[in-house]
Image (tube, helix red, strand yellow):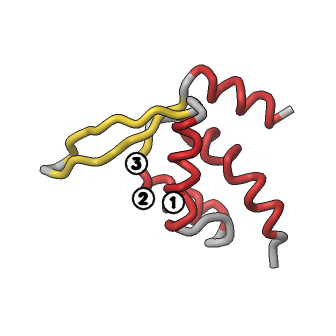
Amino acid sequence: AVDKSLVSGSTTMLVLKLLERKGMYGYEMIDTLRGKSKNVLIKGGNLYPLLHGLEEKGFVEAYEKKQSEKIRKYYHITRAGKKELKRKSE
């Protein structure tokens, strides 16, 4: 079992770290985090409210991209998001 407070406090940092590497769409982030944490760290219903909160704070920005006849909403980290990631990492 994993302490839920540890998971919730770490999720923001993990999402920002993922987006620091490249822009990603929601399911791609969920799949990546699930794989790295053996299904412990995130559930689909938790990611989107987190992303919307990060977007409101200016830490991530969303953009749409067409991928094989489907339009997906991607996210990328902003300059403010990189500063927040550095602060949380320290």
Q: Which quarter of the picture shows residue 42?
A: bottom right
Q: Residues within 10 Å of mark 3 (few under 14, many from 20)?
A: some
User: Eyeballing the image, is 26 above or below 22?
Assistant: below
Q: Which of 62 and 57 lies nearest the eye of the viewer?
A: 57
Give whichever of discs 3 and 1 has the lower sequence position. 3
**Tag shown at residue 27:** 2
The residue located at (53%, 34%) in the rendering is 60
- Residue 39 picture quarter: bottom right
Q: Secondary structure at mark 2?
A: helix
Image location of residue 57, percent across then percent down: 60, 34
Give the labeled residue for mark 3.
25
Q: Position of residue 62 (x, y in %)?
A: 40, 36
Q: CA distance from mark 3 to mark 2?
A: 6 Å
Mark identifier at residue 12: none
| Left or right of 6, for residue 62 | left
Q: Amino acid at mark 1?
A: Ile
Q: In the picture shown, does residue 55 fall above or below 14?
A: above
Relative depth, front residue between 10 and 34: 10
Residue where numbered disc 1 is placed: 30
Residue sticking out furthest to the front? 56
